[in-house]
Amino acid sequence: MDNNEQLHIRGLNINWEKISPRSYLRGIESIAELDYLQFHKPITFFVGENGSGKSTMLEAIAVAYGFNPEGGTKNYNFSTYDSHSELCDAIRLIKGVHKPGWGYFLRAESFYNVATAEDEYSREPGGVPQHYHEQSHGESFLAMAQSNFKTNGVYLLDEPEAALSPQRQLTLLLEIVRCARAESQFIIVTHSPILLGIPDAEILSFDNGKIHACSYEDTESYQVTEMFINNREQILHSLLNVDD
């Protein structure tokens, strides 16, 4: 599928007049010269080195769409630390013709705070207790994803693999593909060569100063993983300077 009009978020424009001349955003190469970004597939990955701007962009999209900056659904309204940038105020999202029925912003770094809020909300009348803090980090992270991934939804995920074993990443991969095939859209920041392997997904790299499409085999996550697996002893010998 490559029908941009069918996507819930078709793209975005950035109005740089709304961003301070002294903003650190102007120092992020991949974002600094960006005026327009278009999405083409139900699943889009943001990849790149730490500090390349991918999580900053995802967070801005999430807040511009109406999600709580720390994560959750649009119904979540809490803040333990306001760290989001002014980029969200400068972004205008280009939305599709169909309105999604559900959505979720899942962040690895603030998951504990979201799980706490989820438990508190579940105690309200009509709520269903989830007991996320009674499970392991990985179990609760995957459980929250599975309970919130539905058809016809918008899902923004920031490094969802952080808490998951390789096997659980495969489970998450199946959930993502299942929902994407049922009119849901995903925009995902990841370093996982497992998740990046989803067929026909769009991969946008934030490296080398400009956001650009790349193939799975051209991602650093794939290349470094493949190189290490195929040359583990030589690489470790070189890195650790192990004597023969």
Image (tube, rainbow, N blue to C red):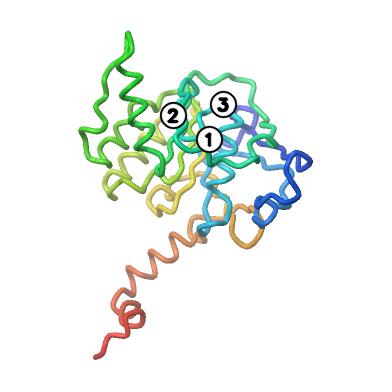
Q: Position of residue 80 (x, y in %)?
A: 44, 35
Q: CA distance from mark 1 to mark 3?
A: 20 Å
Q: Quadrant of residue 125?
A: top left
Quadrant location of the N terminus in the rendered image = top right
Q: Which residue is mark 2?
A: 72
The amino acid marked with disc number 1 is: Pro
Q: Which residue is mark 1?
A: 42
For marks 2 and 1 on the same chain, the one whose residue lies earlier in the sequence: 1
Q: CA distance from mark 2 to mark 3?
A: 10 Å
Q: Position of residue 61 (x, y in %)?
A: 59, 36
Instruction: Determine the secondary structure under disc 2.
Output: loop
Q: Is residue 114 left or right of residue 67?
A: left
Residue ranking furthest to the left: 134
The amino acid marked with disc number 2 is: Gly
Q: CA distance from mark 2 to mark 1?
A: 20 Å
Q: Is residue 221 above or below residue 199?
A: below
Q: Which residue is mark 3?
A: 66
Please report the residue visible at 59 percent of the width from the left and 44 percent of the height from the top: 57
Q: Quadrant of residue 128?
A: top left
Instruction: Determine the secondary structure under disc 1.
Output: loop
- Quick check: marks 2 and 1 in contact, CB under 8 Å? no
Instruction: Determine the secondary structure under disc 3.
Output: loop
